[in-house]
Image (tube, rainbow, N blue to C red):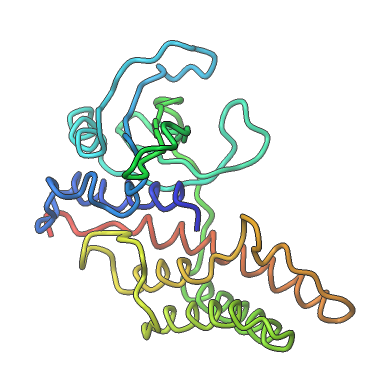
Amino acid sequence: MQTSLVQQIVLTTYGNAHLRGVPGVDWTAFYPSNSSFSYCEFVRFVDRGGREADTTVAPYASDPVAWFERLARDGVSRLRLACGILPGDRHPRWFNEAITPKGGDIWDARWEIGDQHRPDQKIWRVTYARVETDQPMTQLPPIDAADLVRRFTASLVECGDLARRHGMDWFAKVFDNGRAALEGTPMEKVGYDFAPESILPAEARQLLAAVHWSWVFGGMGSWNDVGFEGADHEIYQRSSQELYRALNEALIVAVNALPPSGG
């Protein structure tokens, strides 16, 4: 999974924990220690006044924890991970949405390369900009969790069988890891700290782990670069589309699961 998306997940889950006063989180250690910030020189937040054409920006928060605190002062009740077409875009992408009594504020991330020779490898400069304010809340698709798990599992089985038939052992293992995570019996530990310990329901944590293991799209050497012929090509096309849909729906269901208020 792309680190940029991992970071948006982390900001949503930890942000909701902070906004709802969930105990047991060491906020002094969260930033910059969370794994999603490992290669970031800074992660800061600015306000563009809700006008996409406006080139002026105002500082909003200097780091993620300061952002959580500022959001709380500004009346934000929760954060959501959403996907849609932002102003000036032609294709949908992920963004963070802050919910207020007036509607939703849209936060869009920009990753820029900084000093590539830093010894600590913190080469990314990340800026989240509030590009829309007081908008109608993004309409998330209605998703039946049980049906999602069924479809997710079926696509992993089909993709895994296809990979094994063609000697693609690495992909087969990835899909097997995804299935095990969905069943609550992960074969390996997830490499990212997606959410505070014991915050999300078990089903949401399992979905996140399954997404982590089976996200095989994007980047060189990914599953969408694979090619087959004949009947296996048809199976590949259908199962890959179903898997990609399930991955995205799983993120919406899992990441937006609210932690209990105050624990």
Residue 29 in the image: state x and y as whole percent: 15, 49
Residue at image location 46% in from the left, 57% down from the top? 252
Q: Is residue 233 above or below residue 247?
A: below
Which quadrant of the structure image shows residue 192? Answer: bottom left
Residue 77 in the image: state x and y as whole percent: 25, 40
Residue at image location 14% in from the left, 47% down from the top? 27
Residue 30 in the image: state x and y as whole percent: 20, 49
Q: Nearer the viewer, residue 71 or 145?
A: 71
Residue at image location 10% in from the left, 58% down from the top? 24
Q: Nearer the viewer, residue 171 or 238?
A: 171
Q: Is residue 2 left or right of residue 38?
A: right
Q: Nearer the viewer, residue 31 or 144?
A: 31
Viewport quadrant of the C terminus: bottom left
Q: Is residue 152 above or below residue 30?
A: below
Residue at image location 33% in from the left, 51% down from the top? 10
Q: Is residue 91 above or below residue 89?
A: below
Q: Is residue 237 left or right of residue 182?
A: right
Which quadrant of the structure image shows residue 261? Answer: bottom left
Q: Nearer the viewer, residue 186 or 68?
A: 186
Q: Is residue 154 left or right of residue 107?
A: right
Residue 156 in the image: state x and y as whole percent: 59, 79
Q: Residue furthest right?
A: 230
Q: Is residue 131 above or below residue 94?
A: above
